Image (cartoon, rainbow, N blue to C red):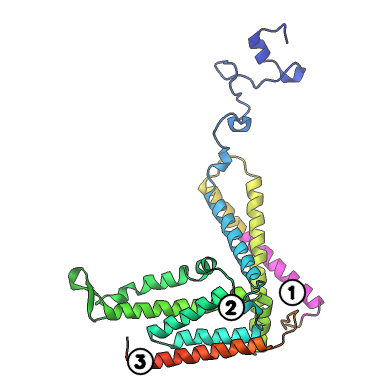
Amino acid sequence: MSDLPPRAAENADPSDGTGAAVGTDSAGGPGSVGASVPGWMLGGSSASPPGRQRRPVLEKLLNGVAHVVESAMDADGAGEHGGLLQRLDPRVKLVGLLALLLASVLVDHLAALLALFAVALTFIVLSRLGLRRFALRAWVFVPLFTLAIVVPATTSWVTPGHAVLHLWGGAAITATGLATAARLVLRVTDAVSFSVLLAMTTPWSELLAALRVLRVPRTFVFVLAVSYRYVFVLMRLVQGMVTARRSRTVGRLTPREDRRFVAAAVGTLFGHSQALSEQVHTAMLARGFTGEVRALSVWRVRSFDYAWAATVTLALAAVAVLELTVKGGF
């Protein structure tokens, strides 16, 4: 190497054991990137690999699947915390929360709906679920969507009444319309809150077994159980397909190629789901499954369960009295 001129040393063939070089460009300048090696592989350029610059469909699909799976796992884990509702017998909890949910549908006055919302907040805090996590799960989409729907009902075009805020064209937002919208949004919020409370504090297997205790048809419970498990299996399969696609892709992907992959993945997923359903059903029958959902734990109604049932009964009675007392209000 010492006998070669500097330009020859830079262009030396790495196969002869005298040194390594990356080659020159068309101008023959020293230290330039060779045509056979992309710049992003050498690490000297700030440009990112071409294949990582645009994968919107794949990224969104993978992130969405991961988010759904993690959220469901997080909900199952919340049922193991030592809060108020987690300690209850699933049968007693199911009956109590369903009674509160039914009350939120039947009551009509704003004060009674606010009282039920206060009961739901109390259960959330005592069950150690976290207000922020519960709000993201229960109070973001459905109540806000309901609010967007009832906005026209607040105007004098739909609900005549005393004008609170005058709008264009002689229209106005009325007090009666605001009260109607508030009642509907609060009713939906209460119902969703009690439903999510039941789902977040009860493992899925125990919830299904509690439904059977309440004489819910066995076929209905079986369909719920299988559907719940299949959702996770199929989502894991989708996640694996997308990860495999990403790991084998080099270069820029066009939106058309992304859409083609998604379409092919849907067909593949359908075939996998059919084959998986037959395998799972055969395995269940081989293990003696008769269609009855059973829980591993032994349930006993304790004094704590009776106390909670009495508390729910008193809360329902108080809401009923409040509903009758403010009957003349809005």
| Residue on which disc 3 sits | 327
Q: Residue at x 61, y 31 (%)?
A: 43
Q: Residue at x 58, y 78 (%)?
A: 198
In 3D space, how far apart are the residues under numbered discs 2 and 3 (Cα atoms)?
30 Å
Tell me residue 269's x, y (percent). Answer: 64, 61
Q: Is residue 269 above or below residue 246?
A: below
For the question of whether residue 211 can be seen, the reply is no
In the rendered view, does 193 fall on the left or right side of 178? right
Type of the residue with mark 2: Leu
Element marked by disc 2: helix
**Most prominent secondary structure in the magenta stretch?**
helix
Instruction: Point out the image quarter for the C terminus.
Output: bottom left
Circles 2 and 1, Cβ within 8 Å, touching? The answer is: no
Q: Label 3 neighbourhood size at 10 Å, few (<14), some (14-19), many (20+)?
A: few
Type of the residue with mark 3: Lys
In the rendered view, does 244 fall on the left or right side of 109? right
Q: Is residue 277 magenta?
A: yes
Tell me residue 104's x, y (percent). Answer: 46, 84
Mark 2 or mark 1, whichever is nearer to me:
2
Q: Quadrant of residue 262?
A: bottom right
Q: Which mark is residue 281?
A: 1
| Residue on which disc 2 sits | 198
Element marked by disc 3: loop
